[in-house]
């Protein structure tokens, strides 16, 4: 299918911002507007109406697609990140990157607490309202403690997103050592378990390395 001049390309994927910029440039030369609106959230958010969209592009173009996004987002919301199509993708990738880092940091802390005799449920409760509380501890830690490694998203896709962010940091000369380590742990998980579904397989890898699993009694 070919887009006609005057039409608009709306991309909801977690695209590489560099690739999206190149595609948008080609589209613009053909008279086609572009909006990047990568989606934040998973199947549960889709059912609950709490999806979030990180939009990037010209204001007029975003206004054109706002009614469509509003229907999809419902209670979630539309976040305008900038007037370049790359801005939405970069923001979404960084948001996800922070969550992946939280998953690793919390898992390591939980494993150390457990090895020192603190029950996982007790440490989880101690995190509530503390400086260590995060989107991961409030939204996903209980699922990890139940043995759920979040099979709604593939570990290979996690690695793709982290690799894209790390590449952007390298290109801009931005210090990114801790995040690079997070990426390596997820790549090790991909190598260990293969390209299967499991957004928290890095946590499972850390459990294996520790010789201990995290479960709430």
Image (cartoon, rainbow, N blue to C red):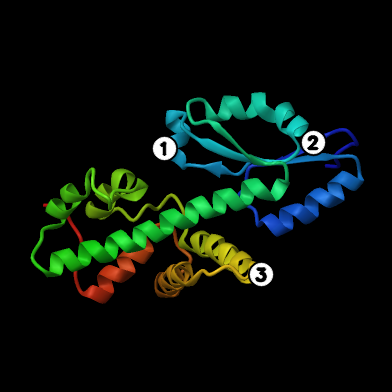
Circle on res. 8? 2
Q: Earlier in the sequence, mark 3 or mark 1?
A: 1
| Residue 82: image location, x then y, percent | 67, 42
CA separation, marks 1 and 2?
29 Å
Looking at the rendered structure, the secondary structure element under dot 3 is helix
- The reply to whether residue 73 is visible in this rendering is yes
* Circle 2 crowding by C-alpha within 10 Å: few under 14, some 14–19, many from 20: some
Instruction: Please tell me whether residue 48 is drawn above or below residue 168 in the rendered image.
Output: above
- Give the residue displayed 51% in from the left and 65% down from the top: 159
Instruction: Please tell me whether residue 128 is drawn above or below residue 15 in the rendered image.
Output: above
Report the side of 116 relative to 68 (left or right).
left
Circle on res. 171? 3
Circle on res. 44? 1
Depth check, mark 1 against mark 2: the one in front is 2
Q: How many marks?
A: 3
Depth check, mark 2 against mark 3: the one in front is 3
| Residue 60: image location, x then y, percent | 77, 30
Instruction: Tell me whether the residue at label 2 lies in contact with that at label 3, contact meaning CB atoms closer than 8 angstroms.
Output: no
- Give the residue displayed 18% in from the left and 57% down from the top: 215
| Residue 156: image location, x then y, percent | 51, 64
């Amino acid at each position: 299918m070919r887009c006609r001049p005057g039409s608009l390309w709306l991309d909801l994927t977690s695209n590489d911002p560099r690739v999206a910029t190149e595609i948008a440039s080609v589209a613009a030369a053909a008279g086609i507007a572009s909006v990047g609106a990568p989606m934040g959230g998973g199947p549960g958010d889709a059912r609950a109406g709490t999806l979030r969209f990180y939009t990037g592009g010209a204001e007029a173009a975003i206004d054109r697609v706002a009614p469509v996004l509003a229907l999809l987002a419902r209670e979630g919301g539309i976040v305008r990140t900038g007037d370049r199509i790359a801005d939405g993708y970069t923001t979404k990738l960084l948001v996800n990157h922070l969550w992946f880092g939280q998953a690793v940091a919390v898992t390591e802390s939980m494993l150390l607490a457990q090895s020192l005799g603190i029950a996982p449920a007790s440490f989880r409760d101690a995190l509530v309202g503390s400086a260590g509380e995060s989107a991961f501890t409030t939204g996903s830690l209980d699922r990890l403690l139940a043995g759920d490694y979040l099979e709604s998203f593939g570990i290979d896709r996690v690695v793709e997103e982290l690799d894209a962010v790390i590449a952007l940091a390298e290109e801009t000369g931005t210090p990114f050592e801790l995040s690079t380590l997070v990426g390596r742990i997820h790549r090790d998980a991909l190598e260990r378990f293969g390209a299967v579904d499991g957004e928290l397989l890095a946590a499972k890898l850390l459990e294996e390395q520790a010789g201990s699993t995290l479960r709430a009694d």
